Image: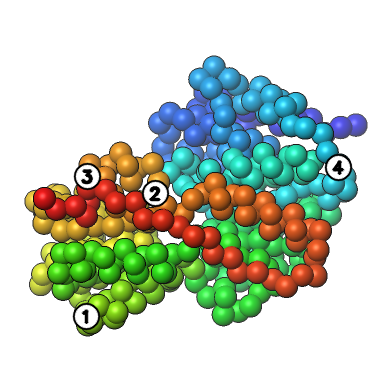
Amino acid sequence: MAKAKILVQDIADALNLSRTTVSKVLNNSGSVSPQTRERVLHKAAELNYKCYSLIQPVLTENLDLEEAFTAQSTDAPEEESAPSQQSQIAVFFSKGIDKQHIGFNLLSVLGQELSRKNYSISMYFIQEAEFQSLLLPPTFHLEQTASIFCIELLDKSYSRMLCSLGKPILFFDAYAGILEDSLPADVLTAESQFRLTGLIKNLIQKYHLQKIGFFGSSLHCLSFFERWLGFRAAILSCGLEYDETYSIIANDDLYWDDRWLLTQLKRMDSLPELFVCANDALACQLMRILASLNIHCPRDILITGFDNCPIASTNQPGITTIDPHSSDLAWEATSLILSRLEEPKQPYRNIRLQSSVIERESTLRR
């Protein structure tokens, strides 16, 4: 007997939430608290719900999630099927993927292209307890899995455990030291280091800057570490000395603690002329806290981000950032997954795709 399809209502009933609330989370629409969003994503992964709206975000205002899945499935052209016993691409993630996350657009293209090869995507939300115990999700079935795609799965021990399963693994970003460890896996990121070096050098030379600071955890992940290296390289190539007192580099969670961040800024003898933020979300947070101190960008300080998230263009002022070209990353991820399945013994690859600078008001002075 075929296993019953898990519906939005099943998730709602399991969590004692309304169907509307659950649909908002799965469709990435409307206002839902972070706590509720986390509960819904976890329960969806636990029930092995095929969360297609996260993969193919083509929902209209009046289109139900299950209807969207059916519409997309019937539109896909028929091609040669993958082996039925290994027809799933497992996507592992540990944080919610909303429209501000680079993984959102990436999964859109990835899901569409893999479906053309008759592979389905199963989403697995990895909890802290599973990281600590090195446990696979309870609904994950290794024998049905063709490949594992990890989106910002940053735990070193867990990453090594996944690489021991004997399945092709692709990491989109990873823990900071993954390239040193030479794991049997492919790694894909947007080029961070050299593009950021170029952006910072241009700003230093354009405005004759002397005081440059970095904002973000340099060891949070591989991409943050490479952005940190790009920041240091720009300072060195411009003949400046690195002064760590202009940077705020700490544990990840602290950056969202307004009181802590205010304290760090007030402790500085003088602020940098340019803050290089590890991503756009951090840039927005920094601008907001600085504004509470009557320090405004770009009048008093220049700020850059990274990722070109939607918020980078809607923020006031708009954030100068680096676009990683998520659609190109998605095409490359698809190609890496399929080519590894076709030729499993080919050398493992560390791929960097070219990114581009987008200048906005946060680095433009009149």
Q: Kindly identify the amino acid type of the residue bearing the numbered disc 4.
A: Ser
Q: Kindly identify the amino acid type of the residue bearing the numbered disc 1.
A: Leu
Expressed as whole percent of the image width and height from the top left, the position of residue 162 reads: 69, 65
SS at mark 2? loop
Q: Are marks 2 and 1 in contact (CB under 8 Å)?
A: no
Residue 241: in sight, yes or no? Answer: yes
Mark 3 or mark 2: name the one nearer the start of the chain.
Answer: 2
Between marks 2 and 1, how big is the CA–CA gap? 28 Å
SS at mark 4? loop
Q: Are marks 1 and 4 in contact (CB under 8 Å)?
A: no
Q: What residue lies at 57% left-to-right and 75% top-to-bottom? A: 179
The residue that label 2 is drawn on is: 308
Q: Quadrant of residue 315?
A: top left
Mark 3 or mark 4: name the one nearer the start of the chain.
Answer: 4
The residue that label 4 is drawn on is: 81
Expressed as whole percent of the image width and height from the top left, the position of residue 28 reads: 49, 34
The residue that label 3 is drawn on is: 317
Between marks 1 and 4, how big is the CA–CA gap? 58 Å
Q: Are marks 1 and 3 in contact (CB under 8 Å)?
A: no
